[in-house]
Amino acid sequence: MRRDLEQECFQTMWFGNVGWRALLYYFDLAGVAVFAASGVLSARDRDLDLLGVIVVAAITAIGGGTLRDLLLNRHPIFWVTDAWYLVIIIASALSTVAYVRVRPAPSTTLLVADALGLALFALSGAQLAEATQCPPLTVVLMGTMTGVTGGVLRDVITAQIPLILRREIYATAAIVGVALYLTLQTLGMPRAPAFWVGMIVVVAMRLLAIRWSLHLPVFRKF
């Protein structure tokens, strides 16, 4: 019943002539592809075989969404019933492996791919939480967790300090983007433009932080 209500809610949202629910689905697939690619780039110097690389890509791509669905009690988990998620992950991982073997990716490619995945997942996660009638603070939390969890798992598995635990403006970008998305709707902006604005803000904050080496202040004992 609850799942049916969510689907009905999405079917009533429209973006031009395209159903918003369908558009959100494609955004989710795009986020999965981008995060899978970031998983491959993160694993490339860790002496993993091809299967290991695909496993890292898969965990990176579906880790955040899986945690989101578990916390929102959305069953079955999204990738269990829709094989396209796994197909996209494998295709993205193999394509990225083939590309970096021919032409090594610049050092910033991982950070850019991660920024795009963070934005796509944070806003799509917020949308799903919003559809379940969660309060605004919970929507922000769910969107942020959806965006950052895959990257945290990726970094832990590849023996790196997770971006969220460094001074990087990472989770902060997701929080600001989702909060802005909700604020703009409260002020009367339609859901679709608010979604785009929130996603652009997340990407812009991450890329500007990378470009200008912007960091959050570090807590130190006095």
Image: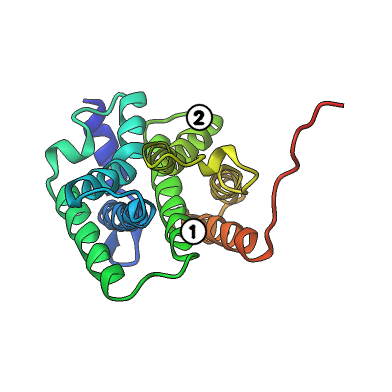
Query: What element does badge 2 sit on?
Result: helix
Residue 211 image-quadrant placement: bottom right
Foreground disc of the pair 2, 1: 1
Image spot of residue 158 (x, y percent) = 38, 42
| Depth order, front residue of 64/27 | 64
Q: Position of residue 22 (x, y in %)?
A: 25, 55
The amino acid type of the residue labelled 2 equals: Thr
Please identify the quarter of the rendering in which residue 116 is found: bottom left
The residue depicted at 12 percent of the width and 46 percent of the height is 83
Left or right side of 162 for 211: right
Cα–Cα span, label 2 and label 1? 27 Å
Element class at badge 1: helix
- Above or below residue 148? Residue 110 is below
Residue underneath mark 1? 111
Residue at screen point 29% across, 44% down:
56
Disc nearer the start of the sequence (2/1)? 1
Relative depth, front residue between 139 and 146: 146
Farthest right residue in view: 222
Residue 18: x, y in percent?
A: 27, 63
Q: Which mark is residue 138?
A: 2
Q: Residues within 10 Å of mark 1 (few under 14, many from 20)?
A: some
Please tell me whether residue 38 is drawn above or below residue 67 in the rendered image: below
